[in-house]
Structures are given as structure tokens and as C-alpha cells.
Image: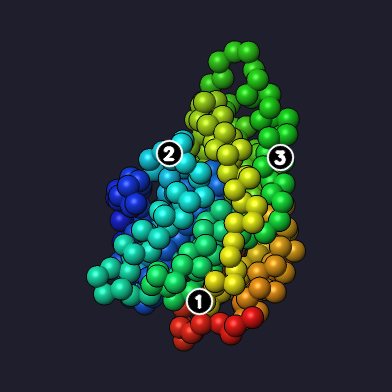
Amino acid sequence: MLQPLFEHRLELAGYETRALELEGQGPPVLLLHGYADSADTWRSLLDLLARQDRRALAVDLPGFGDAGPLDPTEPILPQLTRFTAAAVEHLAGEDGEDVVVLGNSLGGCLSIRAAQDPGLPLRGVVPVAPAGFEHPKWFSIIERDPLLRALLTAPFPVPERIVRGVVAQVYRQLVFAAPRAAAAEVVWSFTHFFRTRDLVARHLATGRRLIPELRDCFALDDVRVPVLLIWGDRDRMVPHRGSRILIDAVPATEYEILPGIGHCPQLEAPHAVFELLERFCGAPAAAPAAA
């Protein structure tokens, strides 16, 4: 049965957000996107899950997509961690069904932080190219991009078409292993949230606040649920050598590296991510062996 995808509004931990939701069977799956992205990054995976009658929820993180703003007086990572916990509780429902959290980049970081919380009803977590394991160079790469710098410093108004075109070029080069092969509709969907220079500058300001918080942001000894780590071997933004830190701390971590794939495997290899997720969800729910 092909489940319909419902788009609606939710309030989680005091933040209003946009949700893409599938009703269905099996362990519920929470999908968390990366920095400056949105729930739309999961549409291909959601389509595959719908065809298998799987239950899933993708949300815009506060401060991104069509979600409400972050509180500028608080650190960002604790706000997103509270939001993630509320999303897990919401998806678990009254029966407290154990949830699988799959997150890419910043969302991957949040999935691991969720795994450290013994009070959450989790079956396991699937971080995909998670941020937080090495000094984050990706943000400086974004800020130094000459096209982006020219866009932000131009002494005249810039039409939306040009703003989105510049963002699309940067996005293609950073996220995809094969930039020219990136689907035009995927790239254009991403740029929907970067229609003006003010929006671009606002996301960059959020990144500057967030970067220091990503250093030493884990307590990996507290992870007590199964972990499936997925990484593309051509990730330009978050090198996969950071996987060693998680594997050393949580030896029972399953690790899959996808050849020829960049920072967002859910976009370049959705079938591979789907198959790995299906296998992981079908495995018995058990805590990994202590380090």
C-alpha cells in the first residue's frame, strides 16, 4: 500500500514547525535534516518508505525551512536537542513505541545527542555524515566562496533569481559528489529558503553561532542504543575519517561507507539509505556492548 504524505504544522518544545508525515507500520522513523536544509531533503526517502507502508516523520528544525525562529538569547544546540526529544516523544505516541532517529549532518549530530538521553523511547539512531566529530571546516568553505561573497557585498539590489542561482551553485559544489548530476528540482527546492540576501545572511549568522557549540558536543559513553553510521566517501563538508571517533567510543556501531557519494546520501543514493534503514529497523532492538 502506498501511504500518502501529509504536510502539516506541528508545535514541538514550544517551536512551530512544518512536518512531512507518513502513516504506516513498523518502527516509526524521525528524519532530521542538516544545517540550512529542510525536511524536503527527505522526500525521495519518504517516497520509498511510503511504498513499503512505513511510518515516518520529517520536520524542519527551528531556525530553518518553514519552522519558527530559534531563541537568539540561548545557545542553539540545546534548543535543537530539546526539539529533537519532543519530536521523538510525539512520534512514539501514547504507547511509547521505540523510535529510530535518522539525521544528516547537523541532524546526525542531533541523533547522536538523542541516543545519549536514557529517557527517550529509542530503538536506535542512524547518523548520516554527522557534524561534531572534527573541527568544522565546512562553514569557512561556505563563507569564503567567491560567488557568495560577491552576492552579499554587491552595492545594489539583487533579484531573487540571481540570489537563488548563486546559492544553487554553492550547494551543488559542496553537497554532491557529482555536482552536474544533481537533480535540478532538488537544487531549486533547497534554494526556496534563500530567496533574498537577508535570508542568506541570516543563515550564515546562525552558522557562526552554531560552530563553537559543535566542538566537544557529545558524551559518547552515554550511548546505549544501536547505532548505524552512514557516510559518503566523497563528502567534501564533513570528512568520513571522523567516523573513527564514534566507532572507537561505541564499538558495536555498524558502519557503512557509500562509494562515490557526497555529503547527503539521501539525495544521491536514496535507495541505498533506504535498504540500510530497512535492515537496521528489522534488527532486534538491543543495547550495544559496553566499551
Front-most of 45 and 224? Answer: 224
| C-beta proximity under 8 Å, tags 3 and 2 | no
SS at circle 2? loop
Whole-angstrom CA distance, mark 1 to mark 3, is 33 Å
Give the label, 1 or 3, closer to the camera: 1
Front-most of 147 and 205? Answer: 205
Q: Earlier in the sequence, mark 1 or mark 2?
A: 2
Whole-angstrom CA distance, mark 3 to mark 2, is 24 Å
Residue 251: image x %, image y %?
65, 79
Residue 245: image x %, image y %?
70, 67
| C-beta proximity under 8 Å, tags 1 and 2 | no
Q: Which residue is mark 1?
A: 225
Mark 3 Cα within 10 Å, few/some/many (few <14, many 20+)? few
Mark 1 Cα within 10 Å, few/some/many (few <14, many 20+)? many
Quadrant in the picture for the N terminus: bottom left
Q: Earlier in the sequence, mark 1 or mark 3?
A: 3
Label drawn at residue 71: 2
**Kind of residue at badge 1:** Val
Q: Which residue is mark 3?
A: 140
SS at circle 3? helix
Residue appearing at x 55%, y 38% in the figure: 206
SS at circle 1? loop
